[in-house]
Image: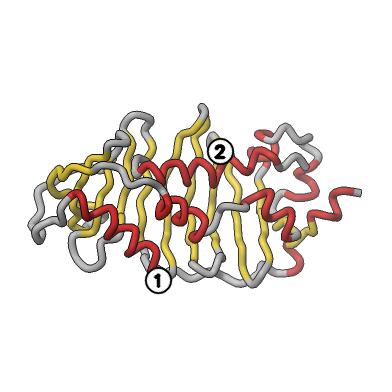
Amino acid sequence: MNIARWTAIPDALAICLAASGCGGSSSGNSAPSPPAAAAVASQVRTAVHDASSVHIDGTVNQAGRSIGMNLSLTRSGEFSGQMSINKAGFTVLSTQGSTYIKVTDAFLKYLNLPSTACNLVCGKYLKTTPTQASSLVGQLSMSALFGKLSSASPPKLSYAGTAAVNGQTTWKYHSSAGGTVYVAAHGKPYPLRLAAPSNGGKLTFSKWNSVTIPGPPPAGQVVDLNQLHG
């Protein structure tokens, strides 16, 4: 299988996070006084660094591709959920030291693989070796994605009022990178949404410190990727 194209997925998310620019609807909501714009980026990075897990839902647009994600990730490196490239979807699961990819016919077509390949792998989980997993989803981990955010030069932020994100009151900050970050106004200042109106990208963050990752799929639903290289 040609797996080189998969690496664009975590790269796109990392770019979005590092820029604080990956919208949400604004509404007036009561909230405590917001942190100074100069301090909020540091506070967000600290909160994210200390978090044990998160759920990410949304779309990132990069190089003419729409990359969708509905993922749960843990600090220990496990993750599970669905992703898509230009609406061609697949499922990912990394648990108990192994990574599995469950592909669809639409995604095989996106990879320009023959339709006969679907007879072998569609509806099955492809179990990968550590090297293959690194090639497929090497940066698709909480530590790698948010590590790039923590190490990036913080953008300049300007306070822009309050907004509701999934029923939670947030402080809204416009970023010098061109987007908007929505920060929880109560409790720890977790980012709850990143929006980039310029390209339509939007990511929503939820379930901070409370996601669970399922165990391995049943053996009858697993295909070893090495078996397809004969």
- Asked if residue 32 is positioned above or below residue 23 in the image, the reply reads below
Judging from the image, what secondary structure is the residue with disc 2 in? Answer: strand
Query: Does the image show residue 14?
Result: yes
Which residue was labeled with disc 1? 210
Compared across the picture, whether 162 is left or right of 23 comes to left
Given residues 224 and 172, the one toward you in this image is 172
**In the drawing, what numbered circle is on residue 220?**
none
Q: Looking at the figure, which quarter contains the N terminus?
A: top right
| Residue 53 at x, y percent in the picture | 43, 67
* Displayed quadrant of residue 146: bottom left
Contact (Cβ within 8 Å) of mark 2 with mark 1: no
Q: Most extreme residue toward the right, as rendered?
A: 230
Gap between marks 2 and 1 measured at Cα: 27 Å
- Asked if residue 199 is positioned above or below residue 6 in the image, the reply reads above
Residue lying at 46% horizontally and 56% vertically, measured from the top left: 147
Residue lying at 26% horizontally and 55% vertically, measured from the top left: 166
Specify how the rendered protein is coloured. Answer: secondary structure
Which residue was labeled with disc 2? 85
Judging from the image, what secondary structure is the residue with disc 1 in? Answer: loop
Name the amino acid type tagged 2: Ile
Few, some or many C-alpha atoms within 10 Å of disc 2 (few <14, some 14-19, many ≥20)?
A: many
Few, some or many C-alpha atoms within 10 Å of disc 1 (few <14, some 14-19, many ≥20)?
A: few
* Displayed quadrant of residue 84: top right
Residue lying at 30% horizontally and 43% vertically, measured from the top left: 155
Compared across the picture, whether 99 is left or right of 53 comes to right
| Residue 91 at x, y percent in the picture | 59, 53
